[in-house]
Image (spheres, coloured by chain):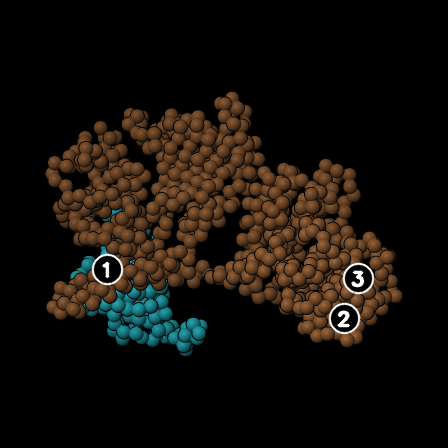
Chain colours: A brown, B cyan
Amino acid sequence: MDMNDFDPEILQDFLTESGELLEQLESDLVDLESTPQDLDLLNQIFRALHTIKGSASFLALTNLVAIAHCSESALNTARNGELVIGKAEMDLLLEAVDILKIQFNEIASGNTDLTPADPELIRKLTVLGDGGTLEADDFQPVSASNTAENIEPKSAEPTPTDGRNIEPIKLDSSKLDLIEHMSTDIDETLAQAIAKLEELYDASTRSSAGCNLTEMFEDIARTVDFFDIKELSELSDVLVQSLEGIESLEDEFIEQIVPRLHGVCMLINEQTKELIHEKLVTWPTETLIERIIKSSEGCKLDEGKIIPQCDPYQALATDGISFGSPQNQEEDKLKSPIQKSTSEPASEPNNATITESKSNPTNAQPQARKANLGAVEQTIRVEVSRLESLMNLVGELVLQKNRIGAMSEEVGRAVTDTDLIEQMEITASTLDRVTGDIQVAVMRTRMQPLDKLFGKYPRLIRDLATKTDKKIQLEIIGGDTEVDKSVIEELGDPMVHLLRNSADHGIEMPADRISAEKPETGTIKLVAGHEGSHVSVRIIDDGKGLSREIIGNKAVERGLITKEQLPSLSDEEVFRYILEPGFSTADQVSDLSGRGVGMDVVRTNIESKLKGSISIESTQGEGTIINISIPLTIAIMPAMMVAVNDEVFAIPLTNITEIVHPTPDMISELGDEPVIHLRGSVHPLISSQEVFAIPEEKRQDENFVVVIGFNQKIIGLRVSRVIGQQEIVIKPLNGVQREGPISGATVRNDGGVSLIMDIAELMRISRNQRSTVCAAH
Amino acid sequence: MHQETIKNNHSDNQIQLVSFTVGEELFAVDILSVQEINRMLELTKVPQSPDGIEGVINLRGRIIPVLDLRVQFKIPPSPHDEHTRIIVVEVQGNTIGFIVDSVHEVLRISYSVIEPAPQMGTSIDSSYVSGVAKLDENLLILLDLERLLSLEALDKLSDMQRTAA
């Protein structure tokens, strides 16, 4: 079957849903390594993999199903307590996840021919799935590439006496491959379902069991639909159908239905087994189906009424199907009769946790189900592009609101009708408030928890630790902090680089750590949280810390600063050189880090794209703290509009600490460098007309100083006039300007365009000015 | 639909053009690349931008760069008047405006009257010209917008002016 037969939308859904599961799966696996006994986690992983496999098999992605299947079998043995997942096993599982990722990417790029997994990997996982161990594995004969043989009936020859009809059918080869995997699934689900069926007898557990069973049966029906065989689908449909309204049925009907359902389960099981051999088994099932439906609709059966709690063979026999007998099929657990017992829920086979948690207080479940259903309906998937366009529209709305605000003031001056003015002002301020609320609401739809990003890092750290032979643990705090989607996107690369740096350069080798009297295992902490209108993300490692000496020398060597200036810099200023492009103190370039490219990405993404700031603290021998602070959203922000000569510029308000109208004695020169005195402290002062290269002859007086704080540094920026505060919507400035301290443009209240100053760049200009002045001396 | 438009516009080996003047010369561009023609709008100058770029304008919420063809063609600047227009075009997915002295007319000419660009005695770089057509008394210069408005062209311009200075 060609994947192109499927609706691209279905494929897209598969990619979105399964992609999310896969991400979760990976981080869960890494968690599992440290807590191999955590059964809940194991089950969660198993379920995720199972769902991926299920959807993939529906789409006939054979190669994907193959690798998912054998990983799942391995996990299943672990779940049954027959395998402890150690490092070697985890390596295999993670390798499998990597292959799944590759295959997902292939699907995303429209490639239907997926890369098959390494047969050796599949074989090893299958060995694990069969309860073998990796050590012993070499001595075992190489088995076929799947576990299908486990469930193949021992006696392949069917007994022709039970009224069944066997006819050969032709299955598509891709379907044939899949049936081998899927019949295991069906087999397992059926076993669980049969175990669950007995709970239907008890009125108190009936509705919850019905709910669980519906899920299982729907699962079966979906799988079975794939083969497109009428007889098989018929049976599975009956299962689902019979459960509708089961909770309101009288006991007498339940007694009629349950043994028959058990019988149907057995029939389906038999059919799927025979399908592997390309044989279709059928029975005269009309009576059976009819009677099940009748009972489930609450109609009394006149004929064919069966005695309560009879075994499924008897039930089938009543309906004209002689399906073997329990005596000669003893080895098959599926066929043991259900006993209406008062057995403890805990005595269920523990793999019943696949679709539902094990035991529940009987009364709590119906409510839990309702809550569950409600939760499902409370979220919908929305295409990101729709949210983007909504955000853009809100941006436009904010601009128009600003214009209305500005106009209402003008109208107020021109019109004398005070009532009208008052009305106008009230309307304008209501509009202002509502727009603000819409803006917040839309922004919130784009918020995602940082866990989306952080979830990938345990794996990253694990791999880094393995590659470098170090012992590293990663602690994540505050992963539920929500930030704008764009922040998540831009933050991804910098975080990877920073973590790599911490793991590669920060954390020492275990031996060095011990001799430094530190715990052998290094710790990297990732701490996120809200701080006012900003989100802070800190990466804290307890490694060897940054060396002021080494970094300083390197900076001098690279001509970033002179040897004489070096002592005047603070530690932080020296550390910040590691963010310079091409700056690396690593003696050797490894494939992890050392080329000095990464930290440049960090700075570009965080400072220029996210308008955030980075600060670095480090104590040699004790570790390094990198603190990233980013605004909650970068699409709309408050700004101060100032005039530079005749042009109006916007300065992000978050970076402004104050605006002063300096008296002459506040401004002086230190060396040749202009400075401003503010309450006893001295800060560098730059002229905006100089920065924006306004020709000397046109320059105006600059009577105001905007005091800008960024990365714990403060500078004064002289401007011609201060106009006022405004919410600005950042628009890209495409193809116009490629240098200079401009980060974008916005539309003003009056409809004109203003440029937005790039604070990080201004800071750099100020620093460079200082350097050249110093260098000149 | 778009395909059809192209066919309609360019049927019978004809091409539909917008002609305009800059200085003494008559220029034309393919009408299909023209999005709109506006009266002069308030321009915001962008510091440290390539020299050919006059500034940016607010085009219904979008911010687009605007060039002055006089700078590009080394024609001495003249003040904007009521005939000055901004022609907004889309080139390689970018929306760009350029200032012209006046827009002349929309006309249809046959491909057969278009001749390859000769080496011109004017100050106009012939690589920006895709062809010339003789119309009555006038010479119509067909511009290659992709070349004219590319960033490389602007860089070249900046470099030239820097060297000259």
Res A311 label: 3
Q: Residue at x 59, y 42 (%)?
A: A32
Q: Nearer the viewer, mark 2 or mark 1?
A: 2
Say which quarter of the image contains residue A302.
Answer: bottom right
Q: Residue at x 39, y 62 (%)?
A: A389
Q: Separation of disc 1 and disc 3 at Cα?
A: 81 Å
Say which quarter of the image contains residue A414.
Answer: bottom left
- The three-letter amino acid code for the residue at tag 1 is Asn
Tell which of A15 and A340 is nearer to you.
A340
Element marked by disc 3: loop
Location of residue A101 with respect to A421 vertically, above or below = above
In the picture of the structure, the residue carrying the numbered disc 2 is: A288
Same-chain check, marks 2 and 1: yes
Location of residue A767 with respect to A272 vertically, above or below = above
How many residues crowd around disc 3 within 10 Å: few (fewer than 14), some, or many (20 or more)?
A: many
- The three-letter amino acid code for the residue at tag 3 is Asp
Location of residue A495 with respect to B116 vertically, above or below = above
Q: Position of residue A94 (x, y in %)?
A: 61, 44
Precedes in sequence: disc 2 or disc 1: 2
Q: Separation of disc 3 and disc 2 at Cα?
A: 15 Å
Q: Residue at x 53, y 41 (%)?
A: A458
Location of residue A700 with respect to A426 vertically, above or below = above
- Horizontally, residue A407 falls left or right of residue A609, namely left
- Horizontally, residue A107 falls left or right of residue A216, namely left
- Horizontally, residue A370 falls left or right of residue A709, namely right
Tell which subunit mark 3 falls on.
A
Marks 3/2 in contact by CB < 8 Å: the verdict is: no
Precedes in sequence: disc 3 or disc 2: 2
In the picture of the structure, the residue carrying the numbered disc 1 is: A749
